Amino acid sequence: MLARTAALACLSLTAACAAQAARTIHVAADGNDAWSGTIARPNAGRTDGPVAGLERARDLVRAARQAAAGPVTAELQPGTYERTAPLALGAEDTGTAESPVTWHGSRARLVGGKVIANFTPVTDPAEAERLDPAVRDKVVRADLKALGLTQFGSAAGGGAELFFQDQPMTVARWPNEGFVKIVDVLGPTPVDVRGTKGTKEGIFTYDADRPSRWVNEKDAWVHGYWFWDWSDQRQRIASIDPATKTLSVAPPYHGYGYRKGQWYYAFNLLCELDQPGEYYLDRETGVLFFYPPAPLGRGQAVVSVAPQLLTLRDLSYVTIAGLTLEATTGTAISVAGGTHNEIAQCVVRNTGSWAVEFSGSEGGVSGCDITNTARGGIALNGGDRRTLTPAHLYADNNHIHHYSRWARMYNPAVAVNGVGNRISHNLIHDAPHEAIAFGGNEHVIELNEIHNVCLESNDAGAIYNGRDWSQRGTVVRHNYLHHINGFEGRGCVGVYQDDALSGNHIVGNVFYEVTMAAFIGGGRDCTINNNVFVDCRPAIHVDARAVGWMKDAVEGVLTTNLKAMPYGQPPWSERYPQLLTVLQDEPGLPKYNTIARNICVGGKWDGIEGKARPLITFQDNLLDQDPHFVDAEHHNYQLRDDSPAWKLGFERIPIEQIGLYRDTKRASWPVAHAVIPLVTPPARAARKPGGPALIYRVQRLDGPPQVDGALQAGEWNGLTADQAMPLAQDVMGNKTSRTSRAWLFRDAANLWVAVDNAVSPAKPISTTAVWGQDDAVELAFRHPVGSQRAAIVVLRGFPNGRWESSDEAGAPAAAVKRAAEGVTYAAKVVAADRWTAEWKVPLASLGIDAARPAKVAFNLSVRKPADDLWLMWRGTESYTWEVDNAGILELG
């Protein structure tokens, strides 16, 4: 009896094991959908073997799941699977925890494009005439309509593209690399954004003669950064006038307008098809012209056709692994809803939009290699903000590079929204704009390596979010950011908390050669703790913009975003008690920020605005001391045991864990990536139309004037026009219409400054004394010229007679105090449209030896709020006090 019971138990276990046994559906590009798919290779009689179609495999997976429990795998054998539409998986294709479903391929390629093999030489005289004579024998043509392709999309993007040897080719353009600058804007409607001026209409002049070649092009376009360096757009050319060198784009115009000095290039021009790798598609005739970079026999030319390759909707426990997915006109993989789904070990490249868009919970993207996407890499969206319920989505151990090749701005390697998701261990590099964009609450961004991003923008961040008090709780920790300094080396931001973003934390990161590494743009309740900054300029930035130029947003978008969330109720009121009183607690001020236990070596420690500094808690930061790195020469910024930082409470950063790691889910190993050396910004003299650096020679004063603001010419050597310093540039160096003048003199001990300001009578001259908000004059000095160690001292005066010595430019307290010693200031409102100011500044207060000749880096700026104008001697393209971008006072 016992033996029979044991035998029955064994049989029962065997049946259960059989029920749970993994089943595999085999797929091959040369398979047969009439076969069962239960064997990997055709049998001897070729009566059974792998199936060919993905939809047939999907149906067999469904049947296997319905027949019995247990894991099911669709195994795609090596080969190319051409697709014109996505494989759609829905609720019928779901797995369970006990019976997961996997779609796996080893060297299997899902290609959403059509191989083009009908190339011929260009023999039609009319076509040849449109080509550059130097390349007519090198360019080939193919009739795509003859291959059944008729839907090409717009030249603006999102349509057919050409790929060769698995790389995206370039739409014929000029110049072949980089950009050209707008010479001037001619639109009739002015645009003025806080003194940055342009026009609404896209009508501008150009410098070179090249555009005259484009007059007869069928569908010519330009791609430019028309007003701001963070907002690009592709626009069709409406007309070109070679006689006046004027180019007009077709409406609708760019939303921000057009500005002199901004940059663009032209594309979709057959006449500019002049180098290997370029192509032009005539969308009217369907003829593709191509200058191959290698003989056609050495690779396949593919035109993208399929909008997507895989869509997963409302299913769970499904894994896509080991596939190569490429050549789409849209996003390659879309996962919408469900739980415990994963995209792993895949190569996703050459897409017309994103690589992966992923929503749901408890799933993510792991170990993938993603490159050459037209937009971003991975978009994660999951979690409920109103209940603060986390989704636990992840992007982990992915190599994402050379992305955002078409839509250049705000298409990051990883975008995350919602609540409680993770971006970890990714390697991200070579991109025009952001690496990571986060929105929502309580994400973790950790152990990523990021370099050489923001290559086409300056007001940009490698890691970015902004404009919300309620999007808080995210921790950016243990990342390595390096070699990031923006377009043309003009600077950008490492971790950018923009426009009063609040309540997030930058902890334990390593920044090397990153401009404005850790940035708080007017926000509150933030921490910048336990980071290492090496050669960053500056390491820390905090400003008070929400009581300055951004003050209207406090009662506007910031309050609106806050009230959209139930911040007065649990769990919000328990998780974020600071929000309960924010509207009653001077909401525009950047309060309750903490900067503690950071290490700063080289570069510059801070660029903190004066109004923000007293509100910050600084604690135990190690500045300008040797922190005893293990091997700084080879960028090992781990600390030795004898580092003085340990005594300050510094916590060890797990540097050895940062970046990619070897794993069975990694698509490739080892992974190589080249670091591009930082671009040196162009010299100021070379990038300003004014030529050499401005120099003002300070003359001797005949006798000391009475500092009363009255500006009596007889007391100031006559206040002659030839002695005047013109204040006629805006921030960007453009000429302004309402100018001011200044005169500077010296005697044996003092610098004397007189300023005459014309203002708009449309708004009363202010009677308060808030820099940025009210009428004001600013003097900024650095002595000696070119010394990065010398502090920039700033003196500001207002029409009501008040003045201040400011620490906004980062001067230490002792320098700020010394600069104020012995200063005399007076101002006078002369009329509704004019006020004047006078200064006496002891040279000793500026650290200048009055007995010796001196050269002082200097700028003089005037704030004119009625015109919303920042007026200055020399436009700095930055803060008014950035004297290294301005001019020089010569004191004889």
Image: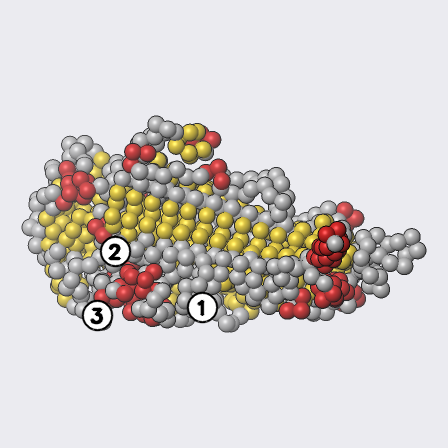
- Judged from this view, the residue extending furthest toward the top is 642
Given contact means CB atoms under 8 Å apart, are the residues at marks 1 and 3 in contact?
Answer: no
Rounded to the nearest whole Å, what is the CA distance between mark 2 and mark 1?
34 Å
Residue marked by disc 1:
255
Look at the numbered disc 3 and give the secondary structure of its residue: loop
Amino acid found under the numbered disc labelled 2: Lys
Could you tell me residue 175's position as x and y percent?
57, 52
Amino acid found under the numbered disc labelled 1: Gly
Amino acid found under the numbered disc labelled 3: Lys
What residue is rendered at 11% in x and 57% in y? Answer: 801
Residue marked by disc 2:
591
What residue is rendered at 80% in x and 57% in y? Answer: 38
Could you tell me residue 871's position as x and y percent?
28, 57
Considering the image in quadrants, where does the C terminus appear? top left
Look at the numbered disc 1 and give the secondary structure of its residue: loop
Of callouts 3 and 2, which one flags the residue occurring earlier in the amino acid sequence? Answer: 2
Of callouts 2 and 1, which one flags the residue occurring earlier in the amino acid sequence? Answer: 1
> 57 or 266: nearer the eye?
57
Q: Would residue 239 be seen by someone viewing this image from the given angle?
A: no
> 543 or 689: nearer the eye?
543
Of marks 3 and 2, the one in the foreground: 2
613 relative position to 264: left or right? left
